[in-house]
Image (cartoon, rainbow, N blue to C red):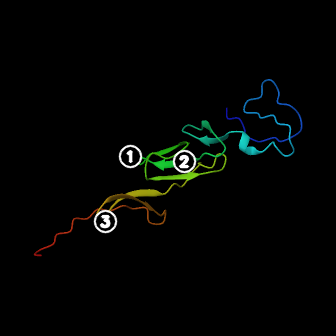
Amino acid sequence: MIKIFKVIQDCDLCGEKEENCFNCNTSYCNEEKYVDKQCWIKNKKLCNTPHDSYCFMERTENNEKRKGCGNCSTLACKKCYKNRCNDWNNINYYCYGFNGTKVVKECSMTEPDCFIVKINNKGC
């Protein structure tokens, strides 16, 4: 079961069993930055990350989707900043590119194909 994530801001103390709760006693001190946000990982599970950190979505070399908390580990990756923002249904494709150096290039969903071609230069 997935718990619905919502932020409640009010006047009172945190309950004894409250997780990820912050008490303060100055005007307007109960800001969202003091509680963690959630990011999606596989199988509809969630991870917690500090409010000022990222969620990420990436394509692996096997064309699998990978999601999580924090920074990306590959170039075929997107970061986002809002709570549970990494729920890509139509994640873009990534292809290898080579223009003097090997790179990873994001391709649009309208042209999701990658290609490779061998160029034969006769005579120089």
For residue 38, side relative to residue 66 (left or right):
right
- In the rendered image, residue 52, in percent from the top left (x then y), is placed at 64, 46
The alpha-carbon separation of the residues under discs 3 and 2 comes to 27 Å
- In the rendered image, residue 21, in percent from the top left (x then y), is placed at 76, 33
Q: Quadrant of residue 116?
A: bottom left
Q: Residue at x 64, y 40 (%)?
A: 50
Say what amino acid the circle numbered 1 marks.
Asn
Q: Which mark is residue 99?
A: 3
Image quadrant occupied by the N terminus: top right
For residue 34, side relative to residue 114 (left or right):
right
Q: Residue at x 86, y 37 (%)?
A: 25
- In the rendered image, residue 68, in percent from the top left (x then y), is placed at 55, 41
The residue mark sitting in front, 2 or 1, is: 2
Asked whether the beta carbons under mark 3 and mark 1 sit within 8 Å of each other, the answer is: no
Dot 3 or dot 2, earlier in sequence: 2
Q: Which mark is residue 56?
A: 2
* Residue identified by numbered label 1: 62
Label 3: few (<14), some (14–19) or many (≥20) C-alpha neighbours in 10 Å: few
Q: Quadrant of residue 15?
A: top right
Dot 3 or dot 1, earlier in sequence: 1
Q: Secondary structure at mark 1?
A: loop
Say what amino acid the circle numbered 3 marks.
Asn
